[in-house]
Amino acid sequence: MGEKHKAVPGEITVARGPWTTCVLLCGKCGKKLDGGFGDKRDESLASVLKQLLRDREQRKWVRVIQVGCLDICPRGGIAAMRGDAPGEMMIIPAGMDAASIAQRLIGGGLTEPATPGS
């Protein structure tokens, strides 16, 4: 991921990332909750998920991204979705266990991406 990419005028180029999946979290829901996750329920869902992935040594394969409003606007929860399943948005209630959230959002089958030519 450390290589530099250059835009070519008049051409769309593809830059490959190291991730196998990405998780999109509604930033507006997160601001309304003002935390709601973690042991003391004072951390954001994004930070809790990122830490769990770091602890499991899976952070480099999953990209957790806070985006603008996903237009579901649940009370007491956060709207989330996987990048590879845009039609399936999930509502995650505040206070839910991070491992359960990761299992539902990411699944258990994370693997290192295939390298080109292998």
Image (cartoon, rainbow, N blue to C red):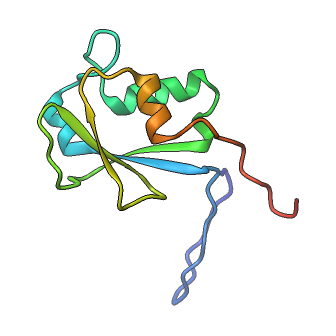
Can you give x and y, in whole percent of width and height, for residue 99 in the image?
47, 24
Residue furthest to the right: 118
Residue visible at 23% across and 22% down in the picture: 36
Residue 109 falls in which quadrant of the image?
Answer: top right
Can you give x and y, in whole percent of width and height, for residue 24 in the image?
38, 48
Residue 115 falls in which quadrant of the image?
Answer: bottom right
Q: Is 99 rendered above or below residue 8? A: above
Compare residues 27 and 21 and report the one nearer the observer: 21
Q: Is 36 rendered above or below residue 106? A: above
Compare residues 2 and 60 and report the one nearer the observer: 60
Image quarter hosting the C terminus: bottom right
Residue visible at 64% across and 40% down in the picture: 110
Q: Is 96 rendered above or below residue 116? A: above
Viewer can see residue 48: yes
Would residue 7 be found to the left or right of residue 116 on screen? left
Residue 70 falls in which quadrant of the image?
Answer: bottom left
